[in-house]
Amino acid sequence: MKTLSIATAMVFGVFGVACASGPAATGSAVVAASAPAAEPASAVVGAAAPGFSLPDSTGKTVSLSDYAGKIVVLEWVNPECPFVKRHADAGTMKRLAEKYDGQVVWLGINSSAHHDSAANAKWISDRSLPYAILNDQSGAVGRSYNARTTPHMFVIDASGKLAYAGAIDDDSNGAKGASAVNYVDAALAELTAGKPVTVAESKPYGCSVKYAK
Amino acid sequence: MRSVCILLFFVLAACGVAATDRPGEGVESQHRATADHPVKADLLADVSAIEPGKPFLVGVRLKMQLEWHVYWKNPGDSGLPVTLEPSGPAGFTFGAMQWPLPVEFNQPGDIAGYGYTGLVVFPIEVRPPADLSNGATIRIAVKAAWLACRDVCIPGGETLELSLPVADKAVVSNEALFAEWRQKLPFEKGYATVKSEGDMRAGELTVRLEWTEPVRSVQFFPVPEAALSVTNVRVEHRARVTTIRFDAKVLAGQKLLSGELESLVVATDPSGTRRGITVPVRLAG
């Protein structure tokens, strides 16, 4: 398990993905030098975003390829997570999705093993969310993006490349108020103006994604 | 940056962690100082009477229910550090919160978490002024906030208070408890000689440690600032020599604030005790 975890870290390390997710596992004791070469499609800023097809809360299949040519935001969600609730209370995601409505496609993804589409539908209805939440109970899509936390944000540009990966903002404890820098807003402002994204990576914060054990 | 972050959180914890506004949560939203919160907090001192001008320690003790944890100053891939904000009468000053050696949690999906399970005591030095009047009662308060996680996370927090009389001579108290937790703080140095090599341009850094005695179960706990990513940590260890390698990278579009990576290396000594040393790793070539 440890070897696998290090191997995973190595795979991500090679592709520079884990940089968006803070430190990898600490090594303990002696680690085998050889790492299995298994590697799923993984998300790397600047490279093509991994494709996916997942059901939304109404059962309709949503694929990333449906939005070819569009800017897409992926928001990892867990309705039980205090960080997600804090942003829902503050309207952070909803406001941003509405601000760029028509220019940007916003998709929530829930990789919690114990949340089915009904749980996602309830969250959408409870919080009057203007966007779909996709069911990734198997965690396969979450793992391909190396989604570590809820929220963990990814912005895909119109050419299908990953343009931003990381936190929603620089305010992990929710104490900065109006002085917080919203990285996703900044990335979307740049992309919709035809500019490259300046801050393309940050460390996500939040609850760990509750992947299947 | 991490320390700035922590400091900031420290200060703002006073306003209450905003993550606590959680309507529709019933039990969970009533977490503050209630009987059903998975973490119980209290405040202790290593004296039962304060001597004017003589520093003493207070300790915030968190007792966690089985399976729950709270987070170290680098929480890992998720979570939030515990924050403590001490206060006292005019003239009292406080040292920084001291962090006992963390453990690593296994979270599904290879998500690293660093922190504490079971029981932890965070000592803080209190420096009283020299002009206290004998017989006065001094009230020390510490505003504590934490995120407790198991399969779900619940924020918690409480203002803990302690009243102590002033006397000619300090009266020692809770001696064994504070001695025990002092042992669990990192050493600045002395338990190993440390050399760090490599630089950020190469993307890989190496730390070599030669221990004063044979140790085992060596673990590396980095505290990277917000702009720095530390990944792919590999620890190789034989008896007295440990080599730690990791990839270090500045996140795209961000700037490093420090030329040094703060880190902690923990090893188990021949008697089975975990001991830790702080290891600053130079990032510049």
Image: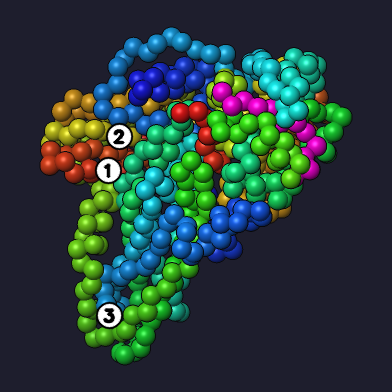
Left or right: where does residue B89 sit relative to residue A114? left
Residue type (three-letter) at the residue carrying disc 1: Ile
What is the CA distance from the residue labelled 2 to the residue labelled 1? 11 Å
**Mark 3: secondary structure:** strand
Q: Which residue is mark 2?
A: B219
What is the CA distance from the residue labelled 3 to the residue labelled 2? 39 Å
Q: Quadrant of residue B264?
A: top left
Region rendered in magenta: A127-138
Task: Looking at the image, tell me whether mark 3 or mark 2 is earlier in sequence order.
Answer: 3
For marks 3 and 1, give the one nearer the viewer: 3
Q: Which residue is mark 1?
A: B277
From the viewer's side, name the closer residue of B249 and B13: B13
- Is B229 contained in the magenta span? no
Q: Which residue is mark 3?
A: B49
Give coordinates of residue B117: x percent, y percent: 36, 47
- Badges 2 and 1: C-beta atoms under 8 Å apart? no
Give coordinates of residue A87: x percent, y percent: 68, 46
